C-alpha cells in the first residue's frame, strides 16, 4: 500500500510541478500577425471550429478523469490529518489575525496631508542553512541543497523579507507591505507573521498587514509539496501530532525576518514626496499559454524623503515569473542526467536590487499580474552565451537599470550605466555588436507626483477547494493551508482579497492567486465568464498584485478551466497545451475572488 501511494502521488506531483508548456499544430497550420488577420481569414473555417469544440470536449474529459476520478479516489483513500477543522463549527469572525484595512476611504488629502514611508529588510534563511539541507521549491520533490549562488562581487545571494510601511498623514493608520523571496505563502502562514506583529501593530496604529511573494522558483520550499510529501502523509495517517510539509525552521525564520524588516521600516519612517511612473516592457515579458492576455507594464513608485540624508525607496511591480534560473534542470555532465542544480537563488530580484542599491535607493519588488507570464530574455535573445542562472543575473540588471532610468533621457541613462559599473558589459565592443543596450528604444516615462491619499480594504472568506489534488495536499497537511471539511466531505480554506488605492495613480486588486490576464483585460479569453473583466467593470485602469496574502494557485475563467488539456491560441493558430490549473483551488475560484473584490469595490466606489 505504501509503495502504491508513493507511486501514484509522485506521478500527480510531477504533473503538478513540472507543468510543461508546449505547442503543437498540423504542418499546414498558419501563423497570424494579429487576431484580426486570423478572424478575416478563418471566419468560415468549419474545420477550425470542429477542432475547438473537440478540444473543449477533450478538456472536459480530462477534468472528469483527473479531478472526478483520480483526484477523488486519492482524496478519499487518504485520511484527514488532525489539523482539519469542522466547517459547520467554524466561525470566520473569530479566526485571528485578519486586518480589514480602513473604515473610510478619502478622495482628497486630509490631516497632515503628507506621505510618510519607512523601509526595512532582513534575511529569511534559517540559522542552520549551510549545515542542514532544505528542499528547493518548484523542482521535483526531494531535491535538497544548502548553498546559495554567489554574485559577481563575491557576495552570497540571500533570501529576504523586504517591508515598507506607508502613511498618508490622514490619521487613519499605517499600512504594511512585506515581500518575501519565496514561491508562495499560504494564508495560514501569513497569519503567523501577523501574530508576531500583533503588539507592534497595536502600538503603531497599523491597520493593514499584507504579505506577498516575489514568486521565485529557486528558493526554499515554502509550500510543502517539495520537501517530503510521502513522509508527511505517512506521519499524519498514523500520528495525531501533525507534521506540516514546510520545514518549521524555515517558517520560523520567515516570521522572524518579516518582523525584523517591519521593525526596521517603522524606525525608518520619514516624510517625503511620492512619484509614480510606468512604461510598457514589450520585449521583456510574454504570455506562454493561450488565451493570450497580459499586462506588459512595469509600475514604479519612487519615495523621495524631504531630508536629503535619508535614503529614497523604489517600489516596483511587474507581472512576470522570476524563474529564469530554474531552467537549469540538469547537470551539464551527461553521466549525471538527473543531477539537478541544488543551489538556491533569489533569481532576478537580487540583481535588480544590486543595481538600484548602487544608485542609492532602497528596493522592494511586489509581484504583479503574474498569470502565465514569464521573461523573454531568460536565454538572452541577443546572443550573449550564459547559463540559466546568469540569464537571471542579466535580466535582473536590466530591470534594475530600467527602473532607475525610467524618467531619464538616453544620455542620462548612458551616464547612469557608467556610474553604476556597467554591470551588463555594454562598453565591451564585442558584446555591443550583438547586445541591445537596455536604454535603446526605451521611452522616457512621465513622472507624476502622487497626492497623499492611501486607501485599503480587505475581506476574508471561505472558498471551496474543488480541485481534489489540492484538497488532498491540504487535508493531509502536506501544504500549509488551513483546511475545513463539511458534512458532505467537501473541503474549504480561508483566503482574502483586497482593494488598494495610492493617490489617483495606482488602483490595485490584491489577488490571492495567479490571475489569468483576460480576467483583468478582457478579450476572447474572458468569453463565458459570468463576471465582467476587472477594467471593464470598474471603468478604471486597475492593476493586479498577485499572490497577496495567500498562495491560491492559478485563477482562470471557468469556461477555460482545465487541469491538463488544450487552449486555442488565436495569435498563432495552434493549440497550446495547458496544465496550469493543476495548481488551483478549483474551477469557480475566479468567480469567488473577483466577485468578492467587486463587492468591496462597490461598497466604497
Image (spheres, rainbow, N blue to C red):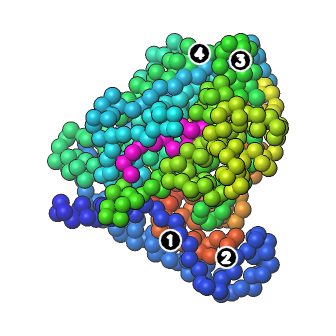
Mark 3 crowd level (few <14, some 14–19, many ≥20, 10 Å Cα): many
Q: Secondary structure at mark 2?
A: loop
Mark 3 to mark 2 CA distance (whole Å): 51 Å
Q: Secondary structure at mark 3?
A: strand
x then y, percent, for residue 592? 56, 50
Name the residue rendered at 63%, 59% in the picture.
383
Residue that mark 1 sits on: 565
Mark 2 to mark 4 CA distance (whole Å): 53 Å
Mark 1 to mark 2 CA distance (whole Å): 16 Å
**Vertical order, 589 against 276 (above or below):** below
Marker disc for residue 305: 3
Of badges 3 and 2, nearer the viewer stands 3
Q: Secondary structure at mark 1?
A: strand
Q: Badges 4 and 1: C-beta atoms under 8 Å apart?
A: no
x then y, percent, for residue 426? 68, 45
Of labels 3 and 1, earlier in sequence is: 3
Figure quadrant of the N terminus:
bottom left
Mark 4 to mark 3 CA distance (whole Å): 11 Å
**Left-right relation of 81 to 409:** left
Residue that mark 2 sits on: 573
Amino acid at each position: 500500500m505504501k509503495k502504491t501511494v508513493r507511486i501514484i502521488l509522485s506521478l500527480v506531483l510531477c504533473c503538478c510541478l513540472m507543468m510543461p508548456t508546449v505547442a503543437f499544430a498540423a504542418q499546414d497550420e498558419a501563423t497570424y500577425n494579429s487576431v484580426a488577420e486570423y478572424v478575416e481569414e478563418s471566419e468560415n473555417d468549419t474545420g477550425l471550429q470542429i477542432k475547438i469544440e473537440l478540444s473543449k470536449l477533450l478538456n472536459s474529459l480530462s477534468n472528469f478523469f483527473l479531478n472526478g476520478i483520480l483526484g477523488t479516489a486519492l482524496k478519499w483513500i487518504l485520511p484527514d490529518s488532525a489539523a482539519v477543522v469542522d466547517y459547520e463549527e467554524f466561525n470566520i469572525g473569530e479566526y485571528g489575525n485578519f486586518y480589514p484595512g480602513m473604515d473610510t476611504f478619502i478622495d482628497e488629502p486630509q490631516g497632515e496631508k503628507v506621505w510618510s514611508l519607512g523601509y526595512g529588510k532582513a534575511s529569511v534563511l534559517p540559522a542552520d542553512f549551510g549545515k542542514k539541507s532544505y528542499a528547493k521549491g518548484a523542482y521535483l520533490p526531494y531535491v535538497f541543497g544548502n548553498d546559495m549562488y554567489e554574485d559577481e562581487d563575491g557576495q552570497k545571494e540571500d533570501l529576504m523579507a523586504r517591508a515598507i510601511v506607508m502613511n498618508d498623514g490622514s490619521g487613519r493608520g499605517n499600512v504594511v507591505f512585506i515581500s518575501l523571496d519565496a514561491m508562495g505563502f499560504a494564508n495560514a502562514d501569513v497569519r503567523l507573521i501577523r501574530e508576531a506583529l500583533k503588539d507592534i501593530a497595536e502600538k503603531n496604529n497599523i491597520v493593514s498587514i499584507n504579505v506577498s511573494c516575489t514568486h521565485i522558483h529557486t528558493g526554499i520550499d515554502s509550500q510543502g509539496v517539495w520537501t517530503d510529501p510521502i513522509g508527511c502523509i505517512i506521519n499524519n495517517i498514523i500520528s495525531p501530532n501533525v507534521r506540516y510539509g514546510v520545514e518549521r525552521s524555515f517558517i520560523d525564520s520567515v516570521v522572524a525576518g518579516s518582523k525584523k524588516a517591519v521593525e526596521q521600516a517603522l524606525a525608518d519612517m520619514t516624510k517625503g514626496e511620492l512619484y509614480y511612473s510606468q512604461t510598457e516592457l514589450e520585449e521583456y515579458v510574454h504570455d506562454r499559454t493561450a488565451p493570450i492576455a497580459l499586462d506588459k507594464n512595469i509600475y514604479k513608485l519612487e519615495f523621495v524623503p524631504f531630508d536629503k540624508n535619508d535614503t529614497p525607496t523604489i517600489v516596483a511591480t511587474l507581472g512576470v515569473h522570476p524563474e529564469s534560473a530554474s531552467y537549469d534542470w540538469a547537470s551539464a555532465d551527461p553521466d549525471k542526467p538527473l543531477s539537478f542544480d541544488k543551489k538556491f537563488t533569489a533569481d532576478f530580484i537580487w540583481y535588480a536590487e544590486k543595481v538600484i542599491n548602487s544608485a542609492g535607493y532602497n528596493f522592494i519588488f511586489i509581484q504583479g499580474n503574474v498569470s502565465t507570464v514569464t521573461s523573454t530574455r531568460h536565454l538572452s535573445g541577443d546572443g550573449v552565451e550564459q547559463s540559466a542562472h546568469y540569464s537571471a543575473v542579466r535580466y535582473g540588471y536590466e530591470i534594475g537599470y530600467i527602473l532607475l532610468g525610467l524618467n531619464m533621457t538616453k544620455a542620462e541613462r548612458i551616464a547612469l550605466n557608467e556610474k553604476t559599473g556597467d554591470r551588463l558589459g555594454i562598453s565591451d565592443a564585442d558584446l555591443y555588436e550583438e547586445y541591445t543596450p537596455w536604454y535603446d528604444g526605451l521611452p522616457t516615462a512621465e513622472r507624476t507626483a502622487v497626492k497623499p491619499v492611501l486607501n485599503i480594504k480587505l475581506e476574508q472568506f471561505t472558498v471551496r477547494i474543488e480541485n481534489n489534488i489540492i484538497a488532498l495536499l491540504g487535508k493531509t497537511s502536506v501544504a500549509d493551508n488551513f483546511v475545513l471539511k463539511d458534512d458532505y466531505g467537501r473541503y474549504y480554506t480561508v483566503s482574502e482579497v483586497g482593494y488598494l488605492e495610492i493617490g489617483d495613480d495606482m488602483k490595485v486588486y490584491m489577488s490571492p492567486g495567479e490571475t489569468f490576464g483576460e480576467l483583468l483585460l478582457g478579450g476572447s479569453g474572458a468569453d463565458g465568464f459570468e463576471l465582467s473583466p476587472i477594467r471593464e467593470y470598474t471603468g478604471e485602469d486597475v492593476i493586479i498584485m498577485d499572490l497577496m496574502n495567500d498562495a491560491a494557485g492559478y485563477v482562470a475563467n471557468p469556461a477555460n478551466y482545465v487541469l491538463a488539456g488544450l487552449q486555442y491560441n488565436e495569435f498563432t493558430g495552434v493549440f497550446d497545451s495547458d496544465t496550469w490549473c493543476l495548481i488551483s483551488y478549483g474551477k469557480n475560484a475566479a468567480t469567488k475572488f473577483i466577485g468578492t473584490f467587486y463587492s468591496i469595490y462597490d461598497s466604497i466606489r
